Amino acid sequence: MRRIRGLYAVALLGLTLGCGNKSDKHAPGISEQCAGMSYCVSSGNGIGASGGVHIAPNTPDAGAGGSSSMAPDAGPGTISGKVQIMGGSDLLQPQTLNFGKVEVSALGQNGHRITATYDGNADFSLDGLAVAGTLWVAVQQTTGATTQELITTLQSRDTTRGNSPELAIVDRTSLTDIVATGGAFLTPTELDTTKGHALIHFVTRDGAPVQQLEIVSTQTIAGAVVAYDAGVTYSDALTATDLKGAALLINMPANIFPGAGKPLTYRLNGRETSFNIDVARDAITIAEVVIN
C-alpha cells in the first residue's frame, strides 16, 4: 500500500488578494471562488509540521484517491493553528509571518468554503469543515504583498481528529528564483499564472527519502517542467529523485481556485503507481507520498 501525506503543509494557490494592480495576473480571491475539492482516507504526519495526512493512491489495495470519506458519526470538522512562510532554494526554510495577513480556507460541511484570517498572532480556527480523512486546505495572501509576495499553498489535513496543524504558504520569489534562467534549471522557465505547480516528497513509512523514482509523463501534466532534488535546490537536468526524494512540477494544466483533483503517476523499480492531489491555477500544492 502506498500513501501520501500533506507536507507542512505548504500542498498550494494563487495570490490575488493583496496583489494590488497585479490582481489580474493571479487567481481570484477566495470569496470569488467555487467550492469543490477531492478527499481521500488515511492519516499520518506531515513533513515540517504536525497534523499532516496520507492521501490514498489509486492502487487495488488502497482504493481510489480523491474519493469522499466522511465519518458518519463525527461532528463538524475543526482545524486550528498557525501559518509559516516556506522559502529558500529548497522551499523548506521556514520564516515567521510577521507582516500582513493570510486567509485559510477549506470546504465546509454545508458545501461552502469556510475561511479564517491569520496575522501571525492568535491561532486561526476553521470550524464546521467537511469531516474527511483528507481535506485540502488553502492558505492565500490577503495583505502584505508589497513586503513579500506569497503564492497560495494547498495542503491536506485530517478533519476527523481535531488536531491543530501548522500550515504554510510559499514565498513566490523563492519559487521564481528556483526555476529562473541561470539557476539549476536547464530549461528557461517562468511561472505561468494560468497553470498549477506541486512539490512532492516521496518517502518510506519510516520517513526515509525514496531515490531513483521518476514522475511519468502523462496527459494530466502535459507541458509541465519536471525537476528533481539536486542538493539544496531542484534541477530539470535530473531524471529521477535523489537524496531528498523530491520532485518539483512547474506549470501543470489546472483549474481556477480551488482547483480539482489531478492524477499523477510515478515509476519505481519498473512499476507504475498513480495517486491524486488537488491542483489549482497560480498555486503550489505540497504533498508527501508514503511508499510502503
Image (spheres, rainbow, N blue to C red):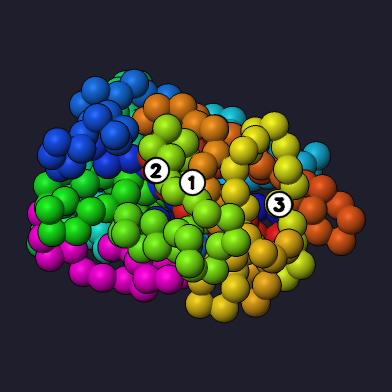
- Please name the amino acid that badge 2 sits on: Ala
| Secondary element at image label 3 | strand
- Crowding at dot 2, Cα within 10 Å, few <14 / some 14-19 / many 20+, comes out as many
The quadrant in which residue 203 appears is bottom right
| Secondary element at image label 1 | strand
Q: Residue at x 46, y 27 (%)?
A: 255
Reply yes or no: does residue 140 show up in magenta. Answer: no
Q: Earlier in the sequence, mark 3 or mark 2?
A: 3
Q: Does the residue at mark 3 contact the one at mark 2 (Cβ under 8 Å)?
A: no
| Residue at mark 1 to residue at mark 3: CA–CA distance | 14 Å
Q: Residue at x 27, y 41 (%)?
A: 15
- Crowding at dot 3, Cα within 10 Å, few <14 / some 14-19 / many 20+, comes out as many
Q: Earlier in the sequence, mark 1 or mark 3?
A: 1
Region in magenta: 85-101
- Please name the amino acid that badge 3 sits on: Ile
Report the side of 71 relative to 242 (left or right). left
The picture places residue 11, in percent across and down from the top left corner, at: 45, 50
- Please name the amino acid that badge 1 sits on: His
Reply yes or no: does residue 86 show up in magenta. Answer: yes
Q: Is residue 253 above or below residue 217?
A: above
The picture places residue 140, in percent across and down from the top left corner, at: 26, 44
The picture places residue 275, in percent across and down from the top left corner, at: 66, 43
Q: Earlier in the sequence, mark 2 or mark 1?
A: 1
- Out of 82 and 278, give the one closest to the viewer: 278
Q: Residue at x 49, y 46 (%)?
A: 197
User: Which of the numbered marks, if any, corresponds to residue 197?
Assistant: 1
User: Which of the numbered marks, if any, corresponds to residue 215?
Assistant: 3
Report the side of 196 relative to 58 (left or right). left
Residue under pointer 2? 283
Q: Is residue 30 above or below residue 238?
A: above
